[in-house]
Image: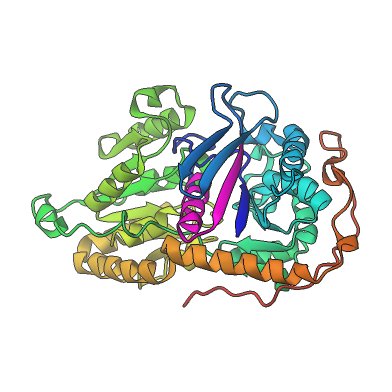
Amino acid sequence: MKIAMISEHASPLATLGSVDAGGQNVHVASLAERLAHQGHTVSVYTRRDDAALPPVVTVAPGLEVVHVDAGPATRLPKDDLLPHMRAFGNELFAAWSRPGAAPDIVHAHFWMSGLAGLSSTGRLDIPLVQTFHALGSVKRRHQGDDDTSPPQRIDLERLLCAEVDLVIATCSDEVTELTALGAAADRIDVVPCGVDIGRFRPDLRRGRRAAHRGDRLHALSVGRLVERKGIETVIRSLVDAVDVDLVVIGGPPAAELGGDPEARRLRDLADALGVGQRVELVGGIDQQGVRDAMHAADVVVCDPWYEPFGIVPIEAAACGRPVIGSAVGGLLDSVVHERTGLLVPPRDPAALAAAFKRLHSDRRLGESLGSAGRIRAERLYGWSTVARRTAHAYENVIDARSGRDRSDARGGPGHVLDGVGSPTGTTRTRPSTREPIGPRTTGEDR
């Protein structure tokens, strides 16, 4: 297949750890690479945020990253990109209108990518698949007035749910949210995020290393330094979990942490609670550094307020590390309570401290949970498995669309972006006439 992916703000070439560079970058890069390795031709379209970037970067055989001119060639917060999605869609339409240039299928990652995809594929009758990675309705529920998303986001996500050929959700919990937005259940498939099980694997020397580290529990948190990731809750839990030390990976490089507001807030909080000497913020590091930190940890803790999926829990599982996670979103799929980790209520320092104490007092439990996590990661979350399931979903969409008359194609040029930037910012389109592609599957063993 000739596959086009749109990832408007999350370039697969980006440095991880900044405010808008995280799990989606890893997902897009890894999925595209593995699809190319399996014989498909993949082009990832991302917004040019630096004038010095070349038009096209060849990443691997069969895989390229295309920088699209849409708005100023400078880094912008993703919440400021909506006004530039019309230009993004126009550039895609121009590229795919050339003879022989149209992809067999387009996979949009994030809602704004979906808008660019809808406005371009609708004019060319190319099948469109959508992965949201995060939903505005969930973000608004948890962040309230602190949500910085464009006010049109939820309405436009609802439009996408009605218009795309298929929504690929990353976890079972997301299906409920999508159906509440109006997505038809038979046009939702669940394919989880993946993990590089060759890179993220258990450390066979761990037993000898652990024997020399004393009796303290070494906990690790990995993720962007944003409030919803719940690192504050983890720090607060240390007041009661007195035998736990915490390393936090994420944010800008170590030398720049002093200028990061969230890093300063977390450091000040730890000092005020009297646990500052037990909390180390190391900044953003590369994937090998993350793996090495997981090898050194006794437990990986993921305690977000909400989480669409979360790659960190499956990276930890692949490394054979137990996970303490909040019982929200994708963690309900990726962490099996009492089998691969422990689930606790979100934003509950006392519950988190109790889980820490349990693993501290029963080291064999932690190792057992970690071993089970590795087995499950190998079976469900390897990128080869995820890529094959994604390709199968693409093939189903193409097969279902092949018999549909072209007169049923999506609306005229740019219809989905008419009015973007206005106070209402949405338009109405007629209901989709696409055929269902088949039943939703999860592939999980919960």
| Most foreground residue, 111 or 356 | 111
Looking at this view, name the residue that lies furthest to the front. 99
In the rendering, at what x and y percent does residue 248 appear?
35, 41
Left or right of 312? Residue 143 is right
Task: Please check the rendered image and state whether residue 26 is part of the magenta-colored stretch, yes or no.
Answer: yes
Task: Please check the rendered image and state whether residue 442 is part of the magenta-colored stretch, yes or no.
Answer: no
| Most foreground residue, 59 or 305 | 59
Q: Is residue 232 visible?
A: yes
Left or right of 284? Residue 146 is right
Picture quarter containing residue 175?
Answer: bottom right
| Most foreground residue, 27 or 60 | 60
The colour scheme used to paint the residues is: rainbow
* Quadrant in which the N terminus appears: bottom right
**Residue at coordinates 43% horizontally, 34% vertically from top-left?**
251
All told, the count of numbered labels is 0
**Residue at coordinates 59% horizontally, 52% vertically from top-left?**
133
**Residue at coordinates 32% horizontally, 34% vertically from top-left?**
282
Q: Is residue 239 visible?
A: no
Left or right of 266? Residue 99 is right
User: Is 366 situated above or below 8?
Assistant: below
In the rendering, at what x and y percent does residue 331 appear?
48, 62
User: Is 112 situated above or below 76?
Assistant: below
In the rendering, at what x and y percent does residue 156 appear?
78, 49
Span of residues in magenta: 24-46
Q: Main secondary structure of the magenta part?
A: helix
In the rendering, at what x and y percent does residue 102 appear?
71, 50
User: Is 396 situated above or below 13?
Assistant: below
